[in-house]
Amino acid sequence: MASSPHFAIAAPWPEVALVELAPALVGAPWALVEFWAPDCLFSRLLLPTRNTLAARYSGCVPLLRCTVQGGEPQCTDWGVSALPAVVLFRHGRPARRWIGVVDVTLMTRVLDVVLREPVRSTGASA
């Protein structure tokens, strides 16, 4: 496996710096943000979940990825107390958060209800 901690990253999750997160959320009624650290094993274990969410919600809701270095205290401003964390924002404010490696079905159940939009299946398209 490559020595880089960035192997096999799902492309639809563009990186945004922590200080640029608030402006990145402006204008989006909903946004999904992953807070992670490259040196955190659990952050890397979230890759299959990230890929599933990208396949299902890309184009329906902005998907962003925020790298946290050295336990930046600004994370607590977003309600993130541990990594990895996936936070669903509504109009720039945290509406729901998942901390740690969480079963993707728990996330999709909530997302399907709150987004109230038909989403693409994670299976092969016809």
Image (cartoon, rainbow, N blue to C red):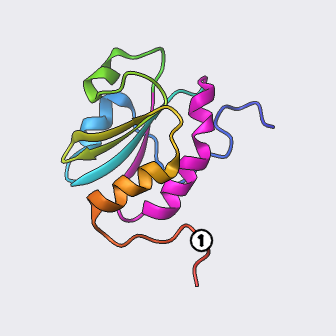
* Magenta-drawn stretch contains 43: yes
Q: Quadrant of residue 86?
A: top left
**Whether residue 12 can be seen here:** no
Residue underneath mark 1: 123
| Residue at point 50%, 40% (across, down) | 102
On-image quarter of the C terminus: bottom right
Residue 123 drawn above or below residue 94? below
Q: Residue at x 21, y 42 (%)?
A: 92
Q: Mark 1: which secondary structure?
A: loop
* x, y percent for residue 70: 48, 14
Magenta stretch, residue numbers: 39-67
Mark 1 neighbour density, 10 Å: few (under 14) some (14–19) many (20 or more): few
Question: Which residue lies at the image location 61% right of the left edge and 23% below the top edge?
Answer: 39
Of residue 53 and residue 26, the one placed in the foreground of this image is 53
Q: Position of residue 116 (x, y in %)?
A: 27, 66
The amino acid pointed to by label 1 is Gly
Left or right, 12 with respect to 40, comes to left
Magenta-colored stretch includes residue 52: yes
Residue 57 seen by the camera? yes
Furthest-right residue in this view: 1
Residue at the farthest bottom position: 126
Q: Quadrant of residue 24?
A: top left
- Image quadrant containing the N terminus: top right
Q: Position of residue 93 (x, y in %)?
A: 20, 39
Q: Position of residue 16 (x, y in %)?
A: 40, 38
Q: State how many labels appear.
A: 1
Picture quadrant where residue 76 is located: top left
**Vertical side of 117 occupied by 47: above or below:** above
